[in-house]
Amino acid sequence: MLWGGFLLLCLLQGALAAGRPPGSEGRRARDAAEGTRLSQDLGGGSVAIDTLPANETRVVEDNHSYYVSRFYGPGDARRRQLWVDLAAANGSHVRVHGILSNTHRQASRIVLSFDFPFYGHLLRQVTIATGGFIFTGDVIHRMLTATQYIAPLMANFNPSFSRNSTVQYLDNGTVFVVQWDKVYLQGKEDMGSFTFQAALHRSGRIVFGYKEIPVPVLQISASQRENPVKAGLSDAFMVLNPSPDVPESRRRTIYEYHRVELDTSRISSLSAVEFTPLPTCLQHQSCETCLSSELTFNCSWCHVLQRCSSGFDRYREEWLSYGCGQSDEQSCEDLAEGDHYSAPPGSSVSVSPGAVTSPTASLFLDSLTTEDDTKLNQFAGGEGSSLPSQSAGAPIPTGTVVGIVVAVLVLAGAILAGIYISGHPTSSAALFFIERRPHRWPAMKFRNHGNHGSYAEVEAASQEKEGFVEAEQC
């Protein structure tokens, strides 16, 4: 059995090695040259991240496609109303995160008590990072700072430097607030402590509040060139594309479709930024309201998905898989009768009309270090409660499938061999094992103990023969 287990372990290790796409290093170099950054998800799969060019949507105060933002200075009364005082809040709603408050470059997932609208999508869980931002993506990968974030001030903060530094959060059912309190920059502790917060309101409003910013943010960027320093919002969608080197495998690519990058020169102590969400196509629940929408988006209705969309949101892969938005017919009757919306052959996308679920499965691994050295821990709604694991939607490598099949065949062969040997004791295989059986058999003697007799094992005497049972006279 030991040899069988060792053989099974070797087969599984070989399968995992075979499941890695060949030429991954060369592909990484080519993608980097083309401007696409390669990363990995927590399941070990390849993820390509395609972000918008720098300053693509740089705004200070303007009407955007998804949000209207506005800065408030120290003298604005509205700024004082936007700040959420966690010290004066209900103590049962405020939690100091013990892990994040005592570590550097860590992230922890928190489950919200309400659905938070972000770019029109309803989120029920977010990931808090010690680096001054909230990650909103479904697929956890190794470049959390690239896209899909809510960042009041993303920088290399180290809450473990001081005992007074904490990362705390509040969730009272109507607003979720994360506050980085008295945190210091790693390696630049002499700059002073920073205190700021991000408030996610149930209505979809997002507020960045800055209580203590000891130095200009541009000075932080100049001193930490290797770490991203930015503030704003970002979202992306993910699609599965064929791998350029391994045709039978598919690589997930995350495309950033919108970003709001704030002017960090305006961030100072006692300032605030308020983001008010604008209507999106996803809010329309019927074909009539979707096609009659006067939004700046080009909204289209997909009958099979029962969804209104512009085609650029987190459901884009599902939208493309069912051929949505490709018809010239504009009436709801034509869309309902059309047959061109059937799912393509081999598509694994499931349809659940009206359901608001994430298009990709969440992946988590305890204490995985990302490419920006942010470690991930599974904490749902508080410290110590584990997040239920979910199966990944990525295809299983061919080598892994082959290895599993071989291991099952080996195990089945061992079972069948055992059954055959037990049924054919005179076969060569049975004789092989009989010759290697133990040579000492226990010597048993029958002893009469008054009212009852029994057999008992005794030390073998010289006159006893192997395998014999010797009984005393009654």
Image (spheres, rainbow, N blue to C red):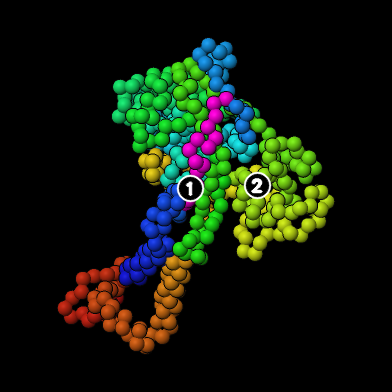
Considering the image in quadrants, where does the N terminus appear? bottom left
Query: In front: 73, or 112?
Result: 73
Residue drawn at x 68%, y 59% as measured from the top left? 343
Q: Which residue is mark 2?
A: 311
Compare residues 117 and 232 and report the one nearer the observer: 232
In the picture, measured across the screen, residue 72 lies left or right of residue 294, that is left
Q: Which mark is residue 173?
A: none
Q: Residue at x 65, y 64 (%)?
A: 345
Query: Is any part of residue 136 visible from this angle?
Result: no
Residue sitting at 37 percent across and 57 percent down?
A: 25
Q: Earlier in the sequence, mark 2 or mark 1?
A: 1
Q: Residue 410: where, in percent of width, then height?
A: 41, 73
> Residue 196, how many percent across, how many down?
46, 23
How would you rate the neighbour count of disc 1 (Cα within 10 Å): few for under 14, some for 14-19, many for 20 or more?
many
Residues drawn in magenta: 47-61
Q: Main secondary structure of the magenta part?
A: loop
**Residue located at (32% from left, 70% from top):** 3
Up/down of 393 relative to 172, above or below: below
Task: Determine which of the numbered discs, if any, sits on residue 49 in the image.
Answer: 1
Local secondary structure at mark 1:
strand
How many marks overall?
2
